[in-house]
């Protein structure tokens, strides 16, 4: 593939991505990261098209070379910015814009003083630096990153290094380096640009789909109002501890609590006030728990707390501390200050428990707490000795 054909293919590829993005979820607003990324594809398409017309006489060199490179720098900067935006790094503009301005000024100076070799080096280094920035954005939170993100980060970094190497060697070793001839470097560099277009095009779309699927999976097990597991999510977290209860070792405790007389808040102050109350209650409870403890919303205003490796007397202490903290915390609803209380039932998981028997026992303790006047902690009934049961 000669250089003219490559430039046309790069322009056409970016234009195709622009068209696909235009019709993607046409009637729905795009995310900020997707909007920046779409802009980057438009800028790159225009830049490659300008470079394609270099030497054709259709446009002056000032427009094709200087204009094409500056537009390309802007497009690559926007592409890296979209990746930083997707990585939730909102301050990327403060670093990207000065770097873009500096690279553009250096290239423009080389163009006007007619330093073709230096211009080639500066152009290659600026482009590779912008590609490296995108690779760094993909590498954010490396330990928790998906395999797709890791692959894209490594591949983008390697191809960016090839672009930089070609730009430097063209000046330092115009005849090539050993068996690596100048023509081979040009072929490799051209292939790198084409692969970068494909990687950053399809890769970004695949990442967007991956994030969307992860969010759907999260919403299936998380209560979005309180940012705690919902019933399904809590039972998923409970399952392995049910299995471990059959082995010797410290027991795992479970508490179920109900926010007392919550309906009066909704009736008197409205549902928005009720949401504030629930969020404050759960935040207060969290402060009394360890990082390893898991709180989940079962239904309505009934919640469960899983306390791994916790004896019953320790679980009762935690429950009492949680009850006292909620009782002592006034909650501002917008129109009034209210105080809420909790009724709590506590038990431990027994080796012969199923989820049905476990929750039946702890629910009975919860009902005892509510019938006893609310705002109290009740221990579940102890197991019946085998000889007594016989």
Image: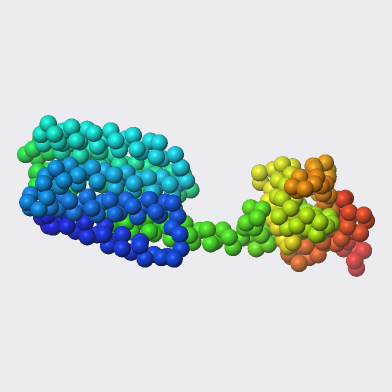
Q: Which quarter shows the C terminus? A: bottom right
Residue at the (19%, 44%) spot, across then down:
67
Query: Residue 287 occupies which quadrant of the picture?
Result: top right
Query: Residue 107 occupies which quadrant of the picture?
Result: top left
Residue at the (24%, 37%) spot, across then down:
104
- Up-down relation of residue 103 to residue 215 (above or below): above
Pinpoint residue 256: horizontal percent, then vertical percent: 78, 56
* Number of numbered markers: 0
Pinpoint residue 22: horizontal percent, then vertical percent: 35, 62
Q: Which quarter shows the N terminus? A: bottom left
Pinpoint residue 164: horizontal percent, then vertical percent: 22, 40
- Up-down relation of residue 362 to residue 335 (above or below): below
Of 210 and 150, which appears nearest the observer? 210
- Up-down relation of residue 98 to residue 340 (above or below): above
Of 224 and 35, which appears nearest the observer? 35
Of 332 and 127, which appears nearest the observer? 332
Pinpoint residue 31: horizontal percent, then vertical percent: 45, 55
Tell me, yes or no, if residue 43 can be seen here: yes
Of 43 and 133, which appears nearest the observer? 43
Residue at the (8%, 38%) spot, across then down:
174
Structure colour scheme: rainbow
Left or right for 288, reference 9: right
Residue at the (40%, 54%) spot, across then down:
34
Tell me, yes or no, if residue 172 can be seen here: no
Query: Residue 103 occupies which quadrant of the picture?
Result: top left
Left or right for 234, reference 149: right
Left or right for 82, reference 218: left
């Amino acid at each position: 593939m000669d250089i003219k054909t490559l430039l046309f293919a790069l322009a056409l590829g970016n234009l195709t991505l622009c068209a696909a993005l235009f019709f993607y979820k046409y009637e729905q607003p795009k995310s900020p990261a997707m909007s920046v990324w779409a802009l980057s594809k438009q800028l790159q398409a225009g830049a490659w098209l300008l470079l394609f017309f270099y030497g054709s006489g259709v446009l002056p060199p000032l427009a094709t070379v200087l204009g094409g490179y500056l537009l390309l720098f802007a497009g690559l900067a926007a592409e890296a910015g979209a990746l930083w935006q997707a990585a939730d790094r909102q301050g990327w503009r403060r670093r990207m814009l000065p770097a873009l301005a500096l690279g553009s000024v250096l290239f423009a100076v080389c163009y006007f003083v007619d330093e073709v070799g230096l211009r080639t080096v500066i152009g290659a280094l600026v482009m590779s630096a912008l590609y490296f920035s995108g690779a760094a954005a993909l590498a954010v939170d490396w330990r928790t990153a998906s395999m797709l993100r890791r692959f894209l980060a490594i591949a983008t970094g390697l191809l960016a290094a090839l672009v930089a190497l070609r730009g430097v060697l063209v000046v330092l070793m115009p005849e090539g380096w050993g068996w690596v001839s100048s023509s081979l470097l040009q072929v490799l560099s051209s292939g790198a640009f084409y692969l970068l277009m494909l990687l950053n095009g399809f890769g970004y779309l695949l990442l967007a789909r991956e994030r969307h699927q992860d969010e759907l999976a999260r919403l299936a097990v998380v209560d979005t109002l309180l940012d705690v597991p919902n019933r399904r999510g809590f039972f998923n977290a409970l399952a392995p501890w049910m299995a471990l209860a059959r082995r010797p070792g410290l027991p795992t405790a479970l508490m179920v609590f109900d926010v007392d007389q919550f309906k009066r808040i909704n009736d008197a102050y409205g549902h928005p006030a009720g949401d504030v109350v629930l969020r404050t209650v759960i935040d207060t409870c969290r402060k009394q728990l360890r990082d390893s403890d898991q709180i989940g919303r079962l239904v309505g205003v009934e919640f469960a707390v899983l306390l791994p490796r916790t004896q019953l007397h320790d679980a009762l202490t935690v429950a009492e501390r949680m009850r006292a903290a909620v009782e002592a915390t006034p909650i501002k609803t917008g129109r009034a200050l209210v105080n809420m209380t909790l009724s709590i039932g506590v038990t431990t998981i027994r080796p012969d428990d199923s989820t049905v028997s476990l929750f039946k026992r702890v629910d009975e303790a919860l009902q005892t707490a509510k019938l006893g006047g609310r705002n109290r902690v009740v221990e579940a009934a102890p197991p019946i000795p085998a000889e007594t049961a016989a």
